[in-house]
């Protein structure tokens, strides 16, 4: 096999950037998409030959090796189980599931079926963050003692992400899951250096939210992680940040400091009176001075992330920890501990 044939479940935002990333890879071919709507638009845009209103019919095809799961969070569990039962390798968008139990069942189903389960944490492949790790590995900042990371913007448009039941929570599980996943990739040594202590604080959702009163999940969240080796990390996710998606990482070592800006660090400066089509995800407008993204999906890591999954399938190799189901489950466990910490007003101890 010199090319991986791919089916995508879902047809909206996540499916679009999966299609974009696969289209740049000569080893990948998207041959089908299954979804309940938007099929004509996505198939026409990306020249996908076959569409299915019932994604299970797509999964029955013998010529598809890899399934991209790009549906709302609460459907991840169902789709992964159906795909595993048919012997497909699976790349599942974040979060792995809406709760720990579903995440555990997904991993067990894939292990039983002998298929690979990839957890789609794009930050692990963001060029800026890969460079950060190479600088740290050279010893440039000495021993790392503290990490800060955040993903924030002005709020989701998805009705499923606004609903705590279908999302699994609010901005903590929907946004802060990215910095949590990357920090595990960076500090855990492949899952060996466990998180042993968690503190979380979120606002209450609904009327308790700062801005998004119609969201049943929280619109502001922060958390602190302590690792077994002694490092601490601070993570943030919120829907109260205007001006576009703001993703940043800071690494503090005994001998130095590294700061990375994934979304606001464009090399372009534009001043426009009438505005223009697009600058950055979640920007309200493009008037005045803006810093438009040059290649947003590439810079956020999606292109290399999906290429890595395709290579693993071609070479029959397991994914590294950061892109594994185990990492996705650890993220869910840490998020759950943060929610418990916020509810109970105390530090939660464990091993994740």
Image (cartoon, helix red, strand yellow):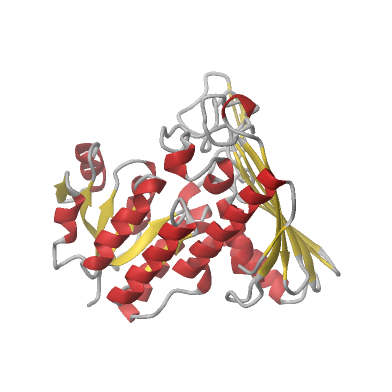
- In front of the other: 85 or 62: 85
| Residue 70 appears in view | no
Where residue 57 sits, quadrant-wise, is: bottom left
Left or right: residue 119 compared with residue 207: left
Q: Please, is residue 243 above or below residue 192 in the view?
A: above
Image quadrant containing the N terminus: bottom left
Query: Residue 239, image x and y in percent?
Result: 59, 35
Q: Please, is residue 319 above or below residue 280 in the view?
A: below
| Residue 131 appears in view | yes
Q: Residue at x 37, y 75 (%)?
A: 312
Of all residues shown, which one is farthest toward the right? 255
Query: Residue 61, image x and y in percent?
Result: 13, 63
Q: Residue at x 38, y 42 (%)?
A: 13
Q: Please, is residue 318 above or below residue 349 in the view?
A: below
- In front of the other: 66 or 134: 66
How many badges with numbers are in the image? Answer: 0
Left or right: residue 213 compared with residue 142: left
Query: Residue 114, image x and y in percent?
Result: 30, 77
Of all residues shown, which one is farthest toward the front? 344
Left or right: residue 331 compared with residue 63: right
- In front of the other: 133 or 164: 164
Q: Please, is residue 149 above or below residue 317 in the view?
A: above
Q: Residue at x 76, y 62 (%)?
A: 232
Q: Residue at x 76, y 67 (%)?
A: 231
């Amino acid at each position: 096999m010199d090319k991986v044939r791919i089916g995508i479940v879902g047809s909206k935002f996540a499916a679009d950037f999966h299609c974009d990333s696969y289209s740049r890879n000569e080893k990948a071919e998207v041959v089908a998409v299954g979804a309940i709507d938007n099929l004509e638009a996505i198939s026409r845009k990306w020249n996908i030959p076959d569409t299915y209103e019932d994604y299970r019919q797509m999964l029955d095809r013998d010529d598809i090796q890899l399934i991209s799961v790009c549906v709302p969070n609460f459907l991840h569990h169902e789709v992964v189980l159906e795909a595993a039962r048919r012997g497909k390798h699976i790349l599942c968008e974040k979060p792995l599931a809406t709760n720990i139990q579903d995440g555990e069942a997904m991993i067990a189903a894939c292990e039983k079926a002998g298929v690979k389960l990839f957890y789609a944490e794009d930050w692990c492949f963001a060029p800026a963050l890969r460079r950060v790790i190479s600088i740290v590995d050279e010893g440039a900042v000495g021993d790392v003692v503290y990490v800060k990371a955040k993903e924030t913007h002005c709020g989701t448009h998805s009705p499923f992400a606004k609903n705590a039941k279908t999302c699994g929570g609010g901005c903590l599980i929907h946004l802060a899951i990215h910095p949590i996943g990357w920090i595990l990739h960076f500090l855990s040594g492949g899952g060996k250096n466990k998180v042993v202590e968690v503190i979380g604080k979120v606002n209450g959702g609904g009327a308790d939210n700062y801005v998004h009163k119609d969201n049943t999940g929280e619109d502001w969240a922060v958390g602190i992680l302590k690792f077994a080796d002694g490092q601490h990390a601070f993570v943030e996710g919120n829907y109260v940040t205007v001006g576009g998606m703001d993703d940043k990482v800071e690494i503090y070592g005994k001998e130095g400091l590294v700061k990375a800006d994934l979304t606001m660090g464009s090399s372009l400066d534009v001043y426009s009176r009438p505005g223009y089509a697009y600058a950055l995800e979640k920007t309200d407008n493009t008037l005045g001075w803006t810093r438009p993204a040059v290649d947003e999906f590439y810079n956020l890591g999606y292109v290399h992330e999906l290429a890595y999954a395709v290579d693993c399938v071609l070479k029959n190799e397991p994914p590294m920890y950061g892109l594994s189901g185990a990492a996705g489950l650890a993220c869910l466990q840490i998020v759950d501990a943060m929610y418990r910490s916020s509810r109970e007003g105390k530090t939660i101890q464990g091993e994740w």
